[in-house]
């Protein structure tokens, strides 16, 4: 994953792209979770609405990430601009990955397990997705969301622990599974990533700004109900010399009763519709 | 992981070889941090200290030699370890007999010594001295922290999923979420989980109840904002201003530590993802705690609600309050 070259990124549009600021940024160590934002998305000012208030030297930072910065700019300013350019790219990235094309790019990275695997033993190495705990920059570092246990984890590597979570945002993984419902991981069994078909109504609802439709999907079956999915989930049961630990067993029974109640609630709702 | 290839047929041999111990277990010497030595033990370093200093062996405690010398503690192990006698000599730094030349390759004995030490270790860390040496490591976070964000850096302990060697590698148990995790570094992938065993982690928290988080959690409104998990990438908010009041679990055998009880709640554009959505939350129960210990009694031993009449809406709201909340807004989906 380190030193990943531009050819890796699915839509290598421009030929001399390898020298661009974005490709440099993407290949920098620690930036492995980011995907490439299409240039025409960045060049459409509509998509950047409001970001000029978030980023100082907005115009020049934008010129820098789109490789339009004047060459005769002083090195001193260039260093400061670089910080602003990273912030701007991060904030654009957070918006981009919840568009149809951005989701599709993150899907490719997910399929290649570029965000790591769930550390929870019973998740059986489920691939993860990045998530922010805040949409405001400089508040929380990026975390990883597991679609199997539906929990969030800290990245293993400290170089990812310093990436701002706002560059991925709080919505991304949840929107991802709304748009690709057949990718919602089963609660048990080995990991397999099925062929994807985006949920069109969701895509349209969420991405009114995006003009084009996602790539034509393969025909796959509509995913089934998830109402009782949790009943299959495996869990760890602490034991001392083979006997369950009383207080923990009691808590686990209570948790499973909460689970069962949710399942009946959801099944009752399904029966109504 | 080295596994025993075949059992040692000659079981009787053991009793003669093991120096009979005095049965007492003294406190362990705690001079683990010797630094790594590259290859074989030197004269100044015991085999045990050397073994525990190897990369990937950071979770091991140094077993007291007199524990190994007491053959009562080794009951049954000789059938699991090939070249038992030679392995014992290696672990205890005893000069080998002349006839040890019958061993074709020293690496075979090394594998046996590792297996022997690991299986003795599984037993040792269940003793008072062993628990004591592990709690010192625990409190210095030698086993690392839980990767789960809402466990807020809770220290973990090593555990096995089996007590038999050769089945699975070592895992880490978190007492806050009662779950097990893969160690973050691949260097632990060569460490057998049986060398820590299935019992240790839980006996540990039964023994040190003040380290075990209690099974109930009440969101204290004042502390809520300062308890935000995770590190801020750049700015650092100086929090932890008000320490909460002392905490007691009425169950004297239960965890006596205030838990980290918040549960992740997925949001899209600031709105909670409804459980009615196909991709809605299904697993929050796995991390949820009741607000009071009494609520645990509302479920019988079969896992059923004793009083099954409840108001749907109220219950959902009540559970929601325990979910992590960044900006309280209504449901959208
Ligand atoms: Zn997981
Ligand atoms: Zn935990």
Image (cartoon, rainbow, N blue to C red):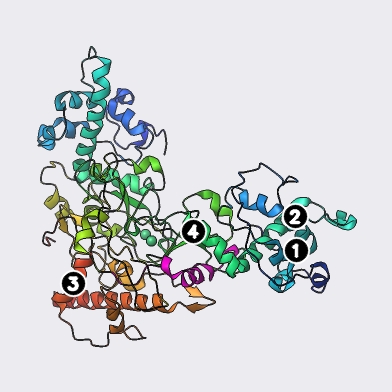
Q: Which residue is mark 2?
A: B108
Tell me residue B111's x, y (percent).
70, 56
Q: Position of residue B201 (x, y in %)?
A: 50, 67
Q: Is residue B168 visible?
A: no
Q: Who comes first in sequence, dot 3 or dot 4?
A: 4
Secondary structure, mark 4, is helix
Q: Position of residue B10 (x, y in %)?
A: 81, 71
Residue that badge 4 annotates: B138
| Residue tagged 3 | B318
Q: Are marks 4 and 2 on the same chain?
A: yes
Q: Which mark is in front, 2 or 3?
A: 3
Q: Are marks 3 and 1 in contact (CB under 8 Å)?
A: no
Closer to us: B262 or B35 = B35
Q: Indicate the quadrant containing the C terminus of chain B: top left, top right, bottom left or bottom right.
A: bottom left
Q: Is mark 2 within 8 Å of ligand 1?
A: no
Q: Numbered disc 3: what chain?
A: B
**From the viewer's perspective, is A34 left or right of B71?**
left
Which of the two discs, 4 and 1, labels the residue nearer the N terminus? 1
Left or right: where does residue A99 sit relative to residue B195? left
- CA gap between label 4 and label 1 equals 32 Å
Residue B267 falls in image quadrant: bottom left
Q: Which mark is residue B82?
A: 1
Disc 3 with disc 1 on a shared chain? yes
Dot 1 alpha-carbon crowd within 10 angstroms: few under 14, some 14 to 19, many 20 or more: many
Chain bearing mark 1? B
Ligand 1 resides in the quarter of the picture at: bottom left
Q: Earlier in the sequence, mark 2 or mark 3?
A: 2
In the image, the segment drawn in magenta is: B194-217
Is residue B204 inside the magenta stretch?
yes
Identify the residue at horizontal 34%, vertical 78% (top origin). B250
* Closer to us: B267 or A43: B267
């Amino acid at each position: 994953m380190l030193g990943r070259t531009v050819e890796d990124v699915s839509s290598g549009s421009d030929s001399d792209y390898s020298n661009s600021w974005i490709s440099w940024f993407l290949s920098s160590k620690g930036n492995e979770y980011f995907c490439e934002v299409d240039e025409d998305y960045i060049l459409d000012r509509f998509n950047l609405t409001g970001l000029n208030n978030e980023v100082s030297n907005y115009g020049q930072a934008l010129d820098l990430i789109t490789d339009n910065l004047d060459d005769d700019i002083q090195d001193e300013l260039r260093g400061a601009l670089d910080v602003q350019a990273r912030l701007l790219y991060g904030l654009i990235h957070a918006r981009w990955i919840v568009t149809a094309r951005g989701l599709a790019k993150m899907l490719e990275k997910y399929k290649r397990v570029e965000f790591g695997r769930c550390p929870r033993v019973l998740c059986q190495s489920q691939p993860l997705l990045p998530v922010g705990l805040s949409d405001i920059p400089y508040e929380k570092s990026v975390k990883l969301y597991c679609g199997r246990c539906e929990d969030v984890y800290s990245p293993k590597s400290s170089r990812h622990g310093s990436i701002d979570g706002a560059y991925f945002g709080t919505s991304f993984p949840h929107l991802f599974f709304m748009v690709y419902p057949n990718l919602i991981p089963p609660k048990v069994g080995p990991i397999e990533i099925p062929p994807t078909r985006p949920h069109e109504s969701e895509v349209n609802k969420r991405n009114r700004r995006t003009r084009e439709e996602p790539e034509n999907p393969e025909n796959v079956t509509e995913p089934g109900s998830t109402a009782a999915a949790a009943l299959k989930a495996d869990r760890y049961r602490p034991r001392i010399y083979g006997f369950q630990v009383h207080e923990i067993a009691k808590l686990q029974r209570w948790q499973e009763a909460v689970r069962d109640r949710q399942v009946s609630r959801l099944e009752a709702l399904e029966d109504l519709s | 992981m080295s596994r025993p290839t075949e059992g040692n047929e000659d079981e009787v041999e053991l009793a003669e070889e093991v120096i009979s111990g005095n049965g007492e277990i003294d406190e362990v010497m705690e001079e683990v941090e010797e630094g790594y030595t590259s290859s074989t033990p030197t004269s100044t370093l015991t085999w045990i200290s050397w073994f525990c200093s190897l990369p990937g062996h950071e979770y091991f405690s140094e077993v007291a030699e007199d524990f190994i010398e007491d053959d009562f503690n080794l009951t049954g192990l000789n059938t699991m370890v090939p070249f038992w006698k030679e392995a014992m000599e290696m672990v205890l730094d005893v000069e080998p007999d002349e006839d040890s030349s019958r061993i074709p390759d020293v690496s075979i004995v090394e594998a046996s010594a590792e297996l022997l030490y690991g299986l003795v270790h599984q037993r040792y860390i269940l003793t008072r001295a062993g628990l004591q040496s592990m709690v010192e490591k625990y409190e210095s976070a030698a086993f690392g922290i839980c990767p789960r964000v809402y466990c807020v850096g809770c220290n973990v302990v090593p555990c096995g999923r089996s007590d038999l060697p050769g089945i699975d590698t070592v895992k880490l148990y978190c007492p806050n979420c009662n779950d097990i995790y893969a160690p973050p570094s691949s260097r632990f992938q060569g460490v057998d989980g049986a060398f820590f065993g299935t019992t240790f982690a839980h006996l540990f928290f039964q023994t040190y109840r003040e380290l075990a988080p209690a099974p109930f959690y009440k969101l204290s409104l004042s502390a809520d904002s300062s308890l935000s998990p995770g590190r801020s990438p750049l700015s650092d908010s100086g929090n932890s201003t008000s320490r909460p009041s002392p905490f007691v679990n009425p169950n004297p055998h239960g965890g006596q530590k205030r838990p980290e009880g918040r549960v992740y709640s997925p949001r899209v554009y600031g709105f909670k993802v409804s459980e009615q959505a196909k991709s809605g939350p299904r697993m929050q129960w796995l991390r949820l705690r009741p607000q009071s210990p009494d609520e645990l009694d509302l479920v019988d031993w079969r896992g059923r609600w004793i009083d099954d009449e409840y108001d749907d809406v109220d219950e959902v709201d009540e559970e929601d309050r325990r979910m992590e909340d960044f900006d309280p807004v209504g449901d959208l989906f």
